[in-house]
Amino acid sequence: QVQLVQSGTEVKKPGASVKVSCKASGYTFTNYAMLWVCQAPGQRLEWMGWINTGNGNTKYSQKFQGRVTITRDTSASTVYMELSSLRSEDTAVYYCARVSSGWLPYYWGQGTLVSVSS
Amino acid sequence: QSVLTQPPSASGTPGQRVTISCSGSSSNIGTNTVNWYQQLPGTAPKLLIYSNNQRPSGVPDRFSGSKSGTSASLAISGLQSEDEADYYCAAWDDSLNGPVFGGGTRLTVL
């Protein structure tokens, strides 16, 4: 069965960077793109970017452009999301999600809480 | 950033039928398919409906989806207490070249 397992909770200070991993299993990794979606407390889900796991091409949301980098390691079936210049407003749960028809999330990781506080 | 519009709350009694609406535009719902997700407190979203009206295996047929023009709807019949959750719609947006989500609807089972 498809599983997406993310790395654990992170606590960071403003200005720092965070790198969250998402290890996929149960399917051919390079056949499906992966999205990253964030959810601040009490807020809607928000798309951050996606990566074509086959060729590594990426597309980032305008809101996060310049601060987010999504990469993948095909040998480890793992996707990474790095967010830099963290501020308190970045405190959120970050999800990876494998797409399916319509290029929308089908399977989700369990989420990673990133807390940004001085 | 384009977003989809949902009512913030909905409610019903056990056994009732409730519907949740999702309004978008020509760049998202008007030209692309809609998914619906259920999110229980403290958990990741779970796919409920994909491609407007398809249910993944394991999702009860009490849940159904529809789309017309730039709007979509999720219907839940035979409401149960375990249906109490947040529900989100999503669609690909051609202008953003990425997905957009609704603001979520909190369903309360009275």
Image (cartoon, coloured by chain):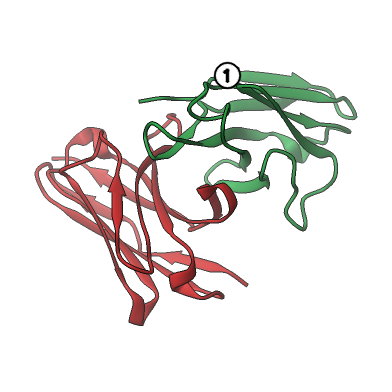
Chain colours: A red, B green
Query: Which residue is labeled 1 in the image?
Result: B8
- Dot 1: few (<14), some (14–19), or many (≥20) neighbours within 10 Å? some
Amino acid type indicated by mark 1: Pro
What is the quadrant of the C terminus of chain A in the image?
A: top left
Query: In this rendering, would A68 be left or right of A2?
Result: left
| In the foreground, A102 or B8 | A102
Residue B2: image quadrant is top left
Residue lying at 29% horizontally and 59% vertically, measured from the top left: A57
Query: What element does badge 1 sit on?
Result: loop
Q: Quadrant of residue B68?
A: top right
Number of disc labels: 1
Report the side of A18 relative to B66 (left or right).
left
Q: In this orientation, does residue B44 appear?
A: no
On the rendered structure, is A109 left or right of B31? left
Res A97 seen here: yes
Q: In the image, what residue occupies the spot 12% across and 41% down?
A: A14
Q: Residue at x 34, y 65 (%)?
A: A79
Q: Position of residue B88 (x, y in %)?
A: 58, 34
Residue shown at the point (55%, 28%) measured from the top left = B104
